[in-house]
Amino acid sequence: MRILVVGAGIGGLTLAGFLKESSIEYDLIEKSSTIKSQGYSLCIWNNGRRILEKLGIAEAFDKAGCPVNYYCVRDGNGNLLRKYNLSNFYSEYGMAHTNISRTVLHTMLIDLVGEEKILFGINIKQIIQRSNKVKVTFSSGEEREYDLVVGSDGIHSEVRSKVFGQGIEKFDDWRVWYAWVDNSFKDRNTITEYIEPNEFVGMFDLKDKTLAILSAPVKHSIWDDVEHRKNRLKVAFKGQVRIGGFIDMLEDRDFIPSDFSHIKMKNIVKGNVVLVGDAAHGFEPHAGLGASMAMEDGYVLAGELMKVGDIYSLKVALRAYQDKRKKRVRIARNLTNRMRGWAFVKSRILRKIINAWMPFFPVSFLLNKYHRLLREEI
């Protein structure tokens, strides 16, 4: 079997890592001309670490990552609304949640696969399926034929657009700005969120760094120019009293914007083309599950592909992959929606009601679905 893996991100590299010792031949292409580990940090729950353990790089991950012991929710003035202790996760699974630099994890996976296995600077121009084969035309004009094409090229997936159609990615009209800030604004081994109507700020501890994530409702169609970005943020986050100081410490270019979007698909297989990771089910980051779910995809798909033989056809393997992932993705989707629902509130009245009741919410409201996700077999 010969397959094409499009995109050397977390999901694509995980798949390649599991195929490394198999008899399956693969090409792994990446549109960037060089290794380009974009992004800030990733939230990895124990389901993701289990995949890294199977790949043999869990110990390196543990050394590089920053374990999260507490999850705190505060109002804009810094008043504590609720503090969740994640110790039960550590006692039951050995780990709860770890923040890690995306660049660090990406580099670990590249080293595992081998940089020489990645073909850089290659885009796909056309994908044509016929007679159980997929003919791919690359941006260079070269044509190659594969038994399977795997779209692991992110939430803005070209493979998905060319094979499954346009308009699948949906934008939420909330924008997020990422910035590295002074370590005095973080609590050690803690994720802290500050919430106000139309305003959300998260502080993430990454050992020697602190990441701030600022979110507010903005129409996706409105472009965010670099010039005067800091002043616009100071107006948008005027309710975030505690974090006002770090905005003044940074420059316009220090804030990197992105728009929240999500992918919901009934089918992630079409003929001999399959999607993994954000291309298949991109989540907003509210529950911190995107990277772990992408690694799960790579692991499950690799396992199904290695069963293909005289009895187990490729078609059966792809159907099994899709069926196995649907339930897990549904749980992750519900978790993401739940975390978003109480954190991203526009109404001042509703915000006051939620804040008043938050100390009395049962812990199970937030954490039980995480336990379900982590207890189930992948």
Image: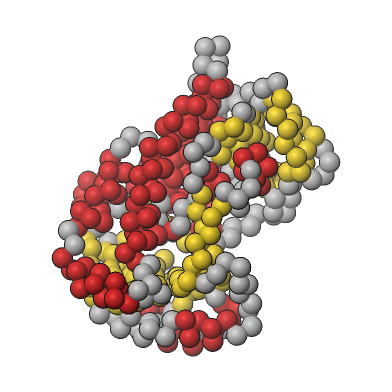
Please indicate, yes or no, whether residue 263 appears anywhere in the rendered image: yes
Q: Position of residue 314 (x, y in %)?
A: 57, 22
Image quadrant of residue 293? top left
Image quadrant of residue 80? bottom left
Residue 4 in the figure: left or right of residue 372: right
Residue under the image location 26 percent in, 56 percent down: 366
Q: Residue furthest right?
A: 141
In the image, is residue 158 above or below residue 190? above
Q: Which sits in the foreground, 8 or 340?
A: 340
* Coloring scheme used: secondary structure
Residue under the image location 29 percent in, 76 percent down: 349
Q: Which sits in the foreground, 58 or 152?
A: 152
Residue 209 in the figure: left or right of residue 74: right
Q: Which sits in the foreground, 9 or 116?
A: 9
Q: Which sits in the foreground, 337 or 189?
A: 337
Please indicate, yes or no, whether residue 7 appears anywhere in the rendered image: no
Image quadrant occupied by the N terminus: top right
Residue 316 in the figure: left or right of residue 26: left
Residue under the image location 53 percent in, 27 percent down: 318
Residue under the image location 24 percent in, 49 percent down: 368
Q: Residue furthest top?
A: 310
Q: Position of residue 225 (x, y in %)?
A: 64, 77
Q: Position of residue 354 (x, y in %)?
A: 25, 69
Image quadrant occupied by the C terminus: top left
In the image, is residue 89 above or below residue 229? above
Number of callouts in the render?
Answer: 0
In the image, is residue 111 above or below residue 195? above
